[in-house]
Amino acid sequence: MSHYLNHPLGMAPTTSTAFLLSSSTPSISPASSSTTFPFNFIFPAKALSTVNFSANPLHAVSAATSGKDHVLGRRGLVLSLTATLPLLLPFYECTAAKAAEEYELMKEEIRKVVTKGKAAGVLRLVFHDAGTFQIDDNSGGMDGSIVYELDRRENKGLKSPFKILEKAKSEVDAVNPVSWADMIAVAGAEAVSICGGPTIQVPLGRLDAKEPDPEGKLPEETLDAFGLKQSFQTKGLSTQELVALSGAHTIGNKGFGNPTVFDNTYFKILLDKPSSGSMIGLPSDRALAKDDECLSWITKYAEDQNTFFEDFKTAYLKLVNSGARWKSL
Ligand code: HEM
């Protein structure tokens, strides 16, 4: 029977349905180290010898040390795992291979429609879907609800990137239906990469909401740094993540260098011209540069693009997992 899993802190799911896929290595493992699923599989796994198997240390230790009355003990645990592993393997191998294929198809169709010029709008769509998340009551988040919210004032201009993705999604759906939440999460990551930013592989398996998220949860562009920090805190995002994610404004037409190049120019310009007029950036961008805590991150990212890329990637993954409900096996 299908059930829903929810990860309020932006953590990856506890079932193995959400896979972190990496094109640079052939390994596929459950997306979070905090997963309760006790195996790590390294694919491709044509023979048992190519399978990297490890029991979750916490579970193994508790089984082995919990006293005489424990039914299994270490030997029992090993025996039962040895017995079930051959049954589980083909199943997970098959699921992971299917997920990898699904991801490749999504990327392919996205790249057919998302040009450099369209990338900024697509990336903004991610924030406007996921950014409704509220950690206190676990509402909103990356759930595809943006499809019901395009007429909202704060979503002005997002119909066009949505329409572009609709085309890609219909092609993907014809082969293998995907959720809007997954589609948007992957499209945002591809948009970053198309513009020269970091490569980001997002886990798949999000479910779509059937109704719009609560209104008024996205930060207003007129907020000061304190207000922006507070707003991000309600989404489980730190000041550092606020600054790193705001670096997304490096693409688009707000005056941070080349509008189709994802780099650290946003931070360099904020550092050089912190109180520049309304020609450069949004009020919220300029507000960040006036806050000491934010300024230290701006300085770090202005000086070191690699650190920005790494931190953006981590924060992006957290953003696209915020409030997500995941398919179960
Ligand atoms: C910190 C709070 C944020 C505020 C107040 C904010 C607000 C805005 C506003 C008002 C625009 C201009 C829209 C227009 O030109 O019509 C914009 C553009 C954009 N935002 Fe944000 N944003 C924030 C954070 C983010 C985050 C976290 C992301 C993604 C990770 C993001 C991605 C973008 C992108 C890529 C654009 C350019 C869109 C384009 O040129 O088509 N923003 N944002």
Image: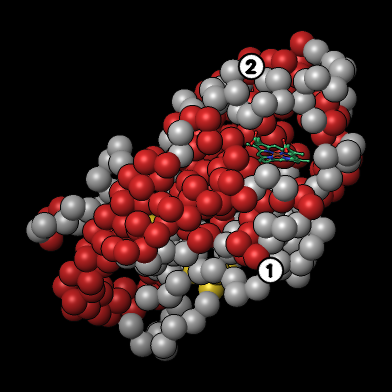
Q: Quadrant of the N terminus?
A: bottom left
The colour scheme applied to this rendered structure is secondary structure
Pointer 1 residue: 212
Q: For the residue labelled by badge 1, is the local secondary structure a helix, a strand or a loop? A: loop
Residue tagged 2:
257
Looking at the rendered structure, the kind of residue marked 1 is Pro
* Image spot of residue 55 (x, y percent): 33, 64
Instruction: Indicate the quadrant where residue 171 lies.
Output: bottom left
Residue density around tag 1, few if under 14, some if 14–19, many if 20 or more, within 10 Å: some
Is 320 left, or right, of 187 in this rendering? Answer: right
Name the one closer to the observer, 96 or 188: 188
The quarter of the displayed image where residue 235 is located:
bottom right
Q: In this picture, is 261 found above or below 18?
A: above
Q: Which residue ends up furthest to the top in the rendered image?
A: 272
Judging depth in this view, the residue of 114 and 58 nearest the camera is: 114
Q: What residue lies at 85% left-to-right and 31% top-to-bottom?
A: 283
Residue under the image location 77 percent in, 50 percent down: 154
Q: Is residue 212 above or below residue 314?
A: below
Q: Position of residue 87 (x, y in %)?
A: 18, 77
Q: Nearer the viewer, residue 5 or 249?
A: 249
- Of the numbered discs 2 and 1, the one sitting upstream in the chain is 1
Instruction: State which image quarter holds ligand 1.
Output: top right
Q: Which amino acid, mark 2?
A: Gly
